Amino acid sequence: MDQHTSGDNIFFIGFMGAGKTTVGRAVAQSLGRPFFDTDQEIEARCGVRVATIFELEGEEGFRQREARVLDELTQRSGIVLATGGGAVLRQENREMLRTRGRVIYLDATLPELWKRTRRNRARPLLQAENPRARLEALFCERDPIYREVAHIIMPAHGGSVAQAAAGVLAQLGFILPDAQ
């Protein structure tokens, strides 16, 4: 573990549809820790869906809200957090994540991401004339940033949620009593 990282918090980053919330929740449950999802926190505080915030305030307005929530949550101790796919776009967010916990990049392939997101109308960034081309462009922009920020890169494909969570926990050095 690098000395600039508290190691107390676990942060999941990755593209929309990679499984950050699902795997993050399973990891939190295994460790008995509180789980947070930045998009869900923003929705709860605003009383509207992320798509509505994008519609009313644009991406920049949403990113400002996201940065505030991320700053608040990453200052907590002993949490598991799933970020929105674009949270890493701001340098200050990358710094918060990198220095306030262990960052796990759930790395999914473009075909997997397309399969998981293509029918989801709640993804404002994919509401484009050519959603697949938009997905590919976003992926190409973000993948190098995810890799730069991550302490650990985990494949997001194959196996069950329990297996994915166990893989993350093993990479983090946790040995749970009921682990197989």
Image (cartoon, grey):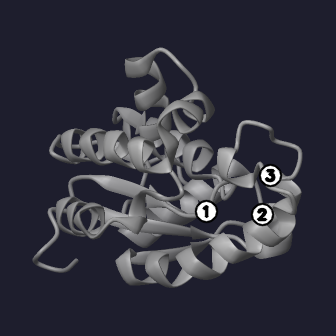
Give the residue type at disc 1.
Answer: Phe
Residue drawn 34% across the image and 39% down it: 65
Q: Position of residue 8 (x, y in %)?
A: 21, 54
Rendered image quadrant of residue 139: bottom right
Q: Are marks 3 and 2 in contact (CB under 8 Å)?
A: yes
Q: Indicate which disc residue 117 carries.
A: 3
Residue drawn 42% across the image and 30% down it: 42
The CA distance from mark 2 to mark 1 is: 8 Å
Residue drawn 36% across the image and 44% down it: 66
Residue at which label 2 appears: 113
Instruction: From the viewer's perspective, tell me whether residue 32 is left or right of residue 157.
Output: left
Rendered image quadrant of residue 114: bottom right
Mark 3 Cα within 10 Å, few/some/many (few <14, many 20+)?
some
Mark 2 Cα within 10 Å, few/some/many (few <14, many 20+)?
many
Q: Are marks 2 and 1 in contact (CB under 8 Å)?
A: yes
Residue at which label 1 appears: 15
